Amino acid sequence: MTPQLSEGRSDTKTKILNAAESLFGQHGFDGTSLRDITAEAGVNLAAVNYHFQSKDSLIDALIERRLGPINRKRIAMLQAAGPAPELEQIVKAFLAPILDYDLAPAVPLIGRVLSNPSLFLDRVYKRHLGETVARFSDALGIALPRLSAEERFWRLHFMAGAMTHILTLSGVLPLMSGSSGTLDRETLIARMVTFLAAGFRAPSPEKD
């Protein structure tokens, strides 16, 4: 395969992914056809079939394109913290990779997925997040051995919720806070780590 041909195929694949991300974000998965995507990307249907084989495979590739690099960096940071990581290291390893990543083009699609819980569970969590979450839960079990697996799940869930809130409102949070300009990522991450670590260390609630 010549370099020119390889680059051409890569460029076509990127065009398809970009078009799919935009259209799925606007119209949802069910409201977007492969022909809509090919028209937006300026390619033919054979190109979609060549690169992705099916609409389901295209959706998975689209999610992997965004979450794959983030999860790999998360695991790398977690491993770099050693076999007995401190709580703050665990929290930062979970948050920093996604807050450092430019997800602006994918925000409409993220909103679509999060507004459909069953879609999120089947398309995102089971296929692209479950293993990573399990690694972080195990690390939390080392840092906070008094927390049960159930309690670790809920606190990880609350952390993910705070992270999602920041992502979806990042464009207006400086205005809401009364500051000017864009968010300072390092300061934001430090604030979140401090706040969330305190939540993880809080006593477990009493059960009736």
Image (cartoon, rainbow, N blue to C red):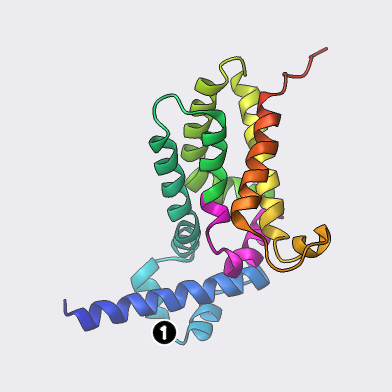
Q: Amino acid type of disc 1?
A: Asn
Task: Look at the magenta stretch and give its main secondary structure.
Answer: helix
- Residues shaded magenta: 97-115
Q: Position of residue 11 (x, y in %)?
A: 36, 79
Depicted 128 relative to depicted 202: above or below: below
Q: Residue furthest left?
A: 1
Q: Residue furthest top?
A: 208
Residue 199 colored magenta? no
| Quarter-of-image position of residue 52 | bottom left
Q: Which residue is mark 1?
A: 44
| Badge 1 density bin: few <14, some 14–19, many ≥20, Cα 10 Å | some
Depicted 43 relative to depicted 121: above or below: below
Depicted 120 relative to depicted 102: above or below: above
Q: Nearer the viewer, residue 158 or 35?
A: 158
Residue 114 colored magenta? yes
Depicted 169 relative to depicted 160: above or below: below
